[in-house]
Each structure stands twice: as structure tokens, then as C-alpha cells.
Image (tube, rainbow, N blue to C red):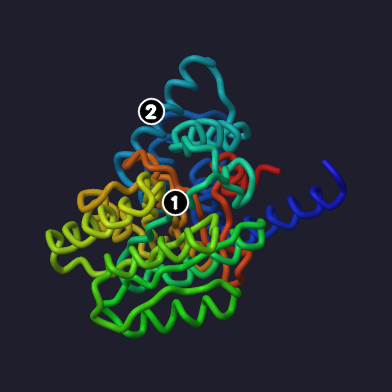
Amino acid sequence: MGLFDKLFNREKKEKLDAGLQKTKEGVWGKITRAIAGKSKIDDDVLDELEESFITSDVGVDTTLKIIDRIRDRVARDKYVSTSELNNLLAEEISDMLAKPQDGTNEEDFKINKNDTPYVIMVVGVNGVGKTTTIGKLAAQYKKAGNKVVIGAADTFRAAAIEQIDIWGERVGVPVVKQKMGSDPAAVAFDTLNSAKAQGADVVIIDTAGRLHNKIGLMNELTKIKNVMKRVVPDAPQEILLVLDGSTGQNAFEQAKQFVTATEVNALAVTKLDGTAKGGVVIGISDQFKIPVKYIGIGEGIDDLQIFRPDEFVRSLFSIS
């Protein structure tokens, strides 16, 4: 690894540590208080840990799994001191988190280029940072040497089209759009045709962020997918659900509804820098068995990071 790579990785780690600061203070602060005056991990410590994780929005089911894992380790190793607890937690939680299967996160925003573009269909309710995530994704994929096209298929809101357009101009990526009220599937169809004509590597399709009618949403998303397959048979290769990490348990509910409505295979969790509820990343990854692929830890374009479970958990428990 060269000097530039070392500096780059150090900068990313520093951003991750800073972005998770509020969550670290919340989770680790509670754990520190739980083990104060204790020399070994006993039932009292485990009870305190359980409360700490539940109140940090990790979720009840996932918390119980973590506690069971720690209890098993303590029983197996006979004696585990509280000073070893953060390393133990990091190992067990990292092992629980769902890992991407396609290998696209092994190197930042690099894809396996071929004759057809890599199509990402982005879903999520309004207000979670969906448009911003699309803009940052486009910027990062472009920065990594990919030719990117965005499709403004959220035609339900005029503001959504305008916001995507602004992001396209900002990062220098073309946006395919139609007027408000147009058929979203038609926009997606035009986007993929345009992308193929331009020799694009990555296509990012925005979709409407409303959940008031799940049947309508499911039908719309299914139609968009079917229409895209006429142009790129295996599209979309990625259906990315964007969730607002600061909403805690509400993010779980949104995930349930979208996983029911469409075949979500990747998650982006945003706004982690402004919340103490970053533990929700652990719970969502565990409960839905869908990999968290990206996390948002700041306002800057480069503050959308590829999610690496080991790095995330080590940062959460302040392990260098």
C-alpha cells in the first residue's frame, strides 16, 4: 500500500469516527456505565448491556442475539474480563452483519464493466435523503472512472425532478427526465436507452417515495423493473433502499414495507452523523439479511462511504 493509499484510508477512518461520534457516545457511554466497578462479565453486566443496546435502537431481537453470543463466549472461555468486552462485542457483531455477495464493495465504487450498464434502482420514502444519496452515488461512481447517467423517474413530485437535475449539474452527470406526471416506467426506459447509446457504465434510477398505497407502489416498481428489462435484461442489478438512520425504529418499519413491496438487495443508511441512533444499522442488517452497502456520515459528497462491517463496528467501539 502506497503513501497516498495510507493517507486516503486514514482520512476515511477519521471521517467514519467523526460521523459516528454521537452514536459512540450513546452506545459506548451506556456500556461504560454498565460495567463500572465490574471485573468480569456476569449476568448483571449482560442485563445492563441488553438495556444499553435496546435503548440505542439496535432492536430487541438483534440485542437478544448479541447477548446470547456474548453469554456463549463467556461460558466457553470460562473467564472474560470487562476490559475485553469491546473487542468481544466487535467480533460477535461484525460476524452477524450481512455481507454483500456481489463483491462490488471490495474497492470503492468500482464495478465489473461489461457491455451493459450496472443499473441501480433507488427506493425510499420522501425525506430520508434519497435524492442526496443519488447525487453522491453519481459523484462517487464518476470519480472512480465510471460513466454515469441518472433517470428522474420520481415524476410524482416536481421538486424531485428539479432536485435531481441540480445534482446532475453539480456533479457533471446527465439526467434523463420528463415533465411531472409522466409515466415513471417510460422515464426509466428512456434512461436505459440513452445510457446504452452513450456507453454508460452505471445508471441510477430515482423512484417515487410514497407509501400511502403499498399495492400501488408495488405495481409501479414492478412495472419500472419490467420495462427496464426490455433494454437491459438483468436490470436492475441493484435495488437500493435508502433509510434515515436518525429515525431509529421508524427505519425498521420503512424497511419492512419496502422489502414487502419489491426485491430490495442493498441498503443505504443516511444521516448517521447527526444521531445517537446509529445502532439501527446493526439491527436492520441482522433482521432483514440485506447488506448495508452505503452509509451517510456527513454533508459532503465524499461523506457517502462504502459500508464495511468490520470497520464500522471497530469504529463504534473505539478500537483502532
Q: Is residue 275 visible?
A: no
Q: Nearer the viewer, residue 128 or 246?
A: 128
Residue under label 1: 279
**Distance between the alpha carbons at the discs numbered 2 and 1:** 18 Å
**x and y percent of residue 125 in the render?**
30, 67
Q: Which part of the image, by quadrant, shows the N terminus?
A: top right
Residue at image point 74% right, 57% down: 11
Is residue 15 rendered to the left or right of residue 82? right
Q: The residue under label 1 is which amino acid type?
A: Gly
Q: Is residue 24 visible?
A: yes
Is residue 17 rendered to the left or right of residue 60? right
Residue under label 2: 68
| Labels in figure, total | 2
With respect to residue 230, does 309 lie above or below? above
Dot 2 falls on a residue whose secondary structure is: helix
Residue at image point 58% right, 38% down: 86
Q: Mark 2 or mark 1, which is nearer to you?
A: 1
Residue at image point 48% right, 62% down: 195
With respect to residue 196, does 110 lie above or below? above
Q: Nearer the viewer, residue 118 or 313?
A: 118
**x and y percent of residue 246 in the render?**
41, 64
On the image, which quarter does residue 216 sit in? bottom left
**x and y percent of residue 259 in the render?**
26, 49
Counting residues from the start of the chain, the first of labels 2 and 1 encountered is 2
Q: The residue under label 2 is which amino acid type?
A: Asp
Residue at image point 29% right, 81% down: 157
